Image (cartoon, rainbow, N blue to C red):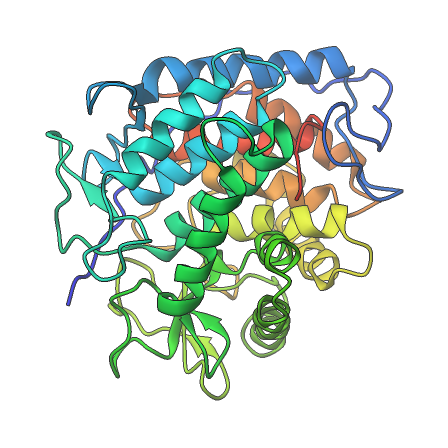
């Protein structure tokens, strides 16, 4: 049985900056999907927002893309992970490239190159899924099996590519997406509980009724249902939306935080015990840090999404616990709101993600502006693929360049 431990740069500094004071941008997006009426945007001009996105995108391209794994191939490097290349990184790269398709003439080449890398490294369990880890020699290692978060993002990136570029060229993006979505259903979803499994290997008694909360991405599941016409994906989304509410009500009524890993999904979901799979499993840590972002983007794009209320709870609490100072957001919390032992400093996985939660709360304009300043004045680190990849994706949303499918 393969267990992995995420190793991330836990103390990448976020530097302070001036709070912007120009008039708020409109709720409608610049190039991407229209947001709901009343959704907050940073109080800076669209040009300023686009420039911030371009800055961090260029840094990501320069520091985390490589062509060393084969002719016509791109791959996203992960110097802060357990292995040189990890599945979620390739998924992030595909999503980022597709969403930058109208801004970067290289974007499609990058996207196709990452897809080539992905297809060259299939899981040994389900060949239509991506092997989760490769070493410096670009060889699949550590079980040669999948990771659900990577496959979800790869499939979603393909659907964005189909929307941006169409599927009549050299790559049929829609067909590739449907192939992977079918495999995710087959090998990475517990068909009885309607929860995402951890991976295609996680089908034994110890792991089959467990799930990673950051895999509960309602927007991705909506896209899968739309693309396939399969109501199964709506059932998965609904069950996981219910689980967020259940966890918040029972385990985090004051904070709204949800844990990295969840067990007991065949009855009443509860936080995983310590030592279940990684570090800080029952807490809001290096996996769940993505939840305000992943849930929050559904709240700003889908009328009636339960995510809107769910992330408002998180947003209210984080403002209160920091006294309205984003510099006081730290790297992880217990579900009750206490700081995690052994964790210090700041990281954009947490700070940037909370900015998407803030967009859902009409009374949080000043707080969102502080978060915007904190995120966009952070000095990116060339060894922190995780933080940089998340920052670019958050900036796509904040700047109105997010594309939903």
Compared with residue 204, is residue 127 higher up or lower down, i.e. above or below?
above
Residue 262: percent from left, percent from top? 42, 71
Viewer-side residue, 78 vs 366: 78
Viewer-side residue, 344 vs 96: 96
Q: Is residue 280 left or right of residue 41?
A: left
Viewer-side residue, 124 vs 395: 124
Q: Is residue 340 left or right of residue 220?
A: left
Q: Is residue 286 visible?
A: no
Q: Quadrant of residue 148?
A: bottom left
Please report the residue visible at 43 percent of the width from the left and 53 percent of the height from the top.
179
Q: Quadrant of the N terminus?
A: bottom left
Please report the residue visible at 58 percent of the width from the left and 79 percent of the height from the top.
250
Please report the residue visible at 57 percent of the width from the left and 22 percent of the height from the top.
100
Viewer-side residue, 30 vs 154: 154
Q: Quadrant of residue 240?
A: bottom right
Please report the residue visible at 87 percent of the width from the left and 27 percent of the height from the top.
26
Q: Quadrant of residue 143?
A: bottom left
How many numbered marks does the figure carry?
Answer: 0
Q: Is residue 345 visible?
A: yes
Q: Quadrant of the C terminus?
A: top right
Compared with residue 381, is residue 262 higher up or lower down, i.e. above or below?
below
Residue 160: percent from left, percent from top? 58, 37
Residue 99: percent from left, percent from top? 58, 28
Residue 162: percent from left, percent from top? 58, 36
């Amino acid at each position: 049985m393969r267990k992995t431990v995420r190793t991330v740069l836990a103390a990448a500094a976020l530097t302070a900056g001036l709070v912007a004071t120009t008039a708020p941008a409109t709720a409608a997006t610049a190039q991407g999907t229209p947001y709901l009426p009343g959704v907050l945007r940073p109080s800076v001009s669209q040009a300023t927002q686009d420039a911030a996105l371009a800055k961090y995108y260029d840094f990501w391209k320069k520091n985390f893309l490589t062509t060393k794994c084969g002719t016509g191939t791109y791959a996203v490097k992960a110097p802060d992970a357990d292995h040189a290349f990890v599945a979620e990184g390739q998924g992030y790269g595909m999503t980022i490239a597709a969403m930058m398709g109208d801004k970067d003439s290289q974007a499609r080449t990058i996207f196709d190159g990452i897809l080539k890398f992905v297809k060259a490294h299939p899981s040994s369990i389900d060949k239509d899924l991506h092997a989760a880890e490769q070493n410096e020699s670009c060889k699949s290692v550590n079980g040669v099996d999948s990771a659900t978060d990577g496959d979800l993002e790869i499939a979603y990136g393909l659907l964005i590519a189909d929307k941006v570029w169409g599927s009549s060229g050299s790559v049929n993006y829609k067909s590739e997406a449907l192939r992977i979505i079918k495999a995710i259903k087959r090998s990475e979803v517990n068909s009885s509980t309607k929860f995402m499994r951890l991976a295609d290997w996680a089908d034994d008694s110890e792991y089959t009724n467990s799930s990673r909360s950051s895999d509960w991405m309602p927007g991705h599941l909506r896209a899968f249902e739309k693309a396939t016409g399969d109501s199964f994906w709506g059932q998965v989304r609904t069950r996981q939306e219910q689980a967020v509410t259940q966890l918040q009500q029972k385990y985090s009524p004051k904070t709204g935080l949800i844990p990295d890993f969840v067990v007991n999904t065949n009855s009443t979901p509860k936080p995983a015990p310590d030592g279940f799979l990684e570090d800080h499993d029952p807490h809001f840590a290096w996996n769940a840090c993505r939840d305000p972002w992943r849930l929050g983007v559904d709240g700003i794009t889908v009328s009636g999404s339960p995510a809107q209320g769910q992330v408002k709870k998180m947003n209210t609490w984080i403002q209160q616990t920091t006294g309205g100072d984003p510099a006081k957001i730290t790297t992880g919390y217990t579900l009750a709101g206490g700081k995690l032992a052994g964790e210090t400093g700041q990281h954009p996985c947490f700070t940037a993600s909370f900015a998407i939660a803030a967009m859902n709360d009409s009374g949080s304009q000043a707080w969102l502006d502080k978060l915007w300043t904190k995120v966009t004045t952070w000095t990116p680190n060339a060894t922190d693929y995780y933080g940089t990849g998340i920052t670019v994706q958050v900036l796509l949303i904040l700047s109105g360049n997010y594309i939903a499918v």
